[in-house]
Amino acid sequence: MRVGVFICHCGNNIAGTVDVARVAAEARKMPGVVFATNYMYTCSEPGQNEIKDTIKQENLDRVVVAACSPRMHELTFRRTVQKAGLNRYFFEMANIREHVSWIGENKDLNTNKAIEAVKIAVEKVKKNKPLIASSFKINKRVLVIGGGVAGMQAALDCADGGLEVVLVEKSPSVGGMMARLDKTFPTVDCSICILGPKMVDVSQHENIKLLAYSEIEEIKGYVGNYQVKVRKKATYVDWEKCTGCGECVEKCPSREAYDHFNFGVAPARAINIPFPQAIPKKATIDPTYCRQFVKGKCGVCAKMCPAGAINYDMKDEIVTEDVGAIIVASGYGLISLDRLPEYGGGRYPDVISGIQYERILNASGPTSGHIIRPSDHTEPKTIVFVACAGSRDKSIGIPYCSNFCCMYIAKQAILTKDHVPDSQSYVFYMDIRSPGKGYDEFTRRAQEEYGVQYIRGRVSRIYPKAGKMVVKGVDTLLGRQVEVEADLVVLGTAVTAAAGAAELAEKLHISYDQHKFYVESHPKLRPVETNTSGVFLAGACQGPKDIPASVGQGSAAAAKVLSLFSRDMLESDPQVASVNTNVCVGCRKCIGTCPFSAIEEQQLRDGRTVAHVIETVCAGCGVCNTTCPCGAIQLQHFTDNQLLAEVNALCLS
Amino acid sequence: MSVVADKELRIVGFLCNWCSYGGADTAGVARFKQPTDLRIIRVPCSGRVNPLFVVKALLSGADGVLVSGCHPRDCHYSDGNYYARRRLENLKRLLPFLGIDERRFHYTWVSASEGARWQQVVTDFTRRLHELGPLHPKPGVAQAVE
């Protein structure tokens, strides 16, 4: 066995707190090691060339690189050794940066730790076996979860690229949050005017299959071959027949339903079409309010419907879609006003959220675009906006910035002045965050052209007094208390992960952070990929994002899928379980424990029944390996012998 | 926080690739300082950790063993960590019968984004072991009083 060890300085990242020369010197003494050296940047081209040259000169058959995390560069170096003619699994990495040099202060202890990390890797690599990937066919269909602007962009780009797309949207119409907006910053473009054509494209594109009012039930499989069960929720209206005429909505006697699309600004009917541009433009019955369901009799809509589309007996339907990749664009949520009691959130009708105000401003909204306040339907003259209502507030568990509130508040203040010329707007803010193109100019315009009063400081309390809302706060620039008697208060409520984000992540086997936003593969370099291959992210499910960023990510995720699907076959990871049929006693324990149903029974010629691993289905977790009572089933590259070699390297010395 | 070289204890950590190994990386990237005793073995899933690996480590020289995986319900492999939890909980109860203080073994969950939590886990577990002292006293090193 001829092991070569390459220690990386990583500039000063490792060499600063680890004596790399000593690590190399100690490595040379390890049994089986015939060569050890240290280099400034092993991952650089000359660094990789040195590995390749040394493999040839020293006739190495195993390589260890001690550098950063294998999650960073394992793939890089596997390719390097492969190029030099070695099997790519004759390689191990010792993590002496993230796990050593960056976290320990004592150079001696760090060096010692690095030496041992190399020792573990050397002992492991000596037990490594050559593994060869097999290839399998890809199903070139893609599932997009979420029909907001990010998901629609992703779906359209994939569909234009010739892929079949299944777009699943949980609400009755695509459009997402952007469809609710009146105008967009910083151009003050009409939101639905630019989104509407995209929505129509989605519904008419021959490659896109839209499943609206549907949710993901279950996801099985792996990159290239996912089986997805989708629950088509009962709408109680046969969408094949519904023409979207709106007759039923008009006549529905149940007029106190919660309007999800308008965020409860005004009540809706129990049978409803969310908005005029809805795609698909079909009615849906909300059974929590519908009299037919609540009281057991009504049937008005069934009588009125000219198409005979109403069906009170409709049940949820489960459909299965086979796809090869998944783009998650499930969007975001907003904190409820109840969580802001100091601002009277949820208690006073004239304290509303930014998205509710957006619906009030919108011409197709419940007030037809006339600014009236909810309590007495009068036109407000003094409007106070409170930025960071919940955002950047550790006390309610939201330490992050919600990204776009500063900008939409400036936009809403400008629109307010347009609608009500004799109005005065005030904005309480912590900092104005306007880093986008044309964004800062826009907030300046709100202040300079539209006379919006920006007050830097926080609001302490909002309470009603004689038909007005008194906003008490501080102006930290003038260093004094301020009090504004407002007609209407708009809170820039904090952005949260979408409801059910964690449950969806668990179905997808992707990770989420403490705020339930999804975690990308790498925060800088792989922003739309996840650690589950074949699953990509787009938009605000990964963190608060404005429209251009979401659209950009939608396109990026689609590009990733298109490049993944540019081949017909994918290479499977050979780090899967494998059965030694001579040792297997056929107890079937592994079959029961495998989370992926990747193990089946196999009849041998001599009549014995043994376990058999379906390689393309095995995900490589190794649960079976630990279950097997006789060690017959071994996870390749992480066998008992390999892991025990690492334990022994640490403990027996 | 670091201990003197000759008093460093032997702590072996089995970390799942997807969550805890990533969490340890995140802690490193954020430069969250930690005691240097821990040595990490990467496994694909906490469900790959055979309890006998832990016993083997403790009997052959380790003073403590830490296993860390993905949070329950967040396993990259659906439910590998549920298997781990069941096996390792049993192991914890078995250790006293082998004459090993069960406090020398700890299993927990750290996600890839929880760098600060990883720092806390390592710091607390290392401190706990230093209070317990070495399991395998080495010549010339004073043993801590249990």
Image (spheres, coloured by chain):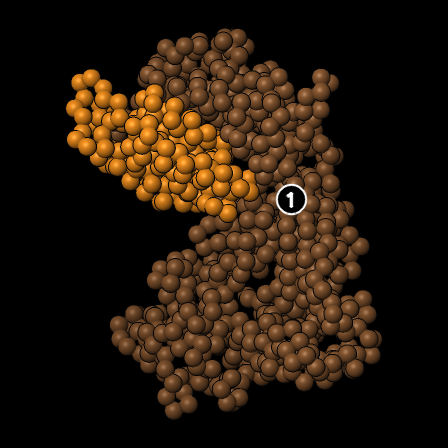
Chain colours: A brown, B orange
In the image, taking residue A320 as reference, residue A327 lies left or right, namely left
Q: Nearer the viewer, residue A496 or A309?
A: A309
Q: Give x and y (percent) for residue A353.
A: 48, 73
Identify the residue shown where x is 47% and y is 66%: A335
Q: Chain of mark 1?
A: A
Q: Nearer the viewer, residue B94 or B49?
A: B94
Number of numbered discs = 1
Identify the residue shown where x is 41% and y is 69%: A339
Let me know if residue A479 appears in the view: yes
Q: Is residue A413 above or below residue B101?
A: below
Residue farthest to the bottom, as pictured? A466
Q: Give x and y (percent) for residue A273.
A: 69, 74
Let me know if residue A425 appears in the view: no
- Place residue A634 in its image quadrant: top right
Identify the residue shown where x is 48% and y is 19%: A641
Tag 1 residue: A220
Q: Give x and y (percent) for residue A16.
A: 32, 29
In the image, taking residue A205 as reference, residue A273 lies left or right, namely left
Could you tell me which secondary element the residue under label 1 belongs to? strand
Q: Give x and y (percent) for residue A487.
A: 44, 85
In the image, taking residue A423 as reference, residue A216 lies left or right, namely right
Quarter of the figure that contains the C terminus of chain A:
top left
Q: Nearer the viewer, residue A392 or A582?
A: A582
Q: Residues within 10 Å of mark 1 (few under 14, many from 20)?
A: some
The type of residue carrying mark 1 is Lys
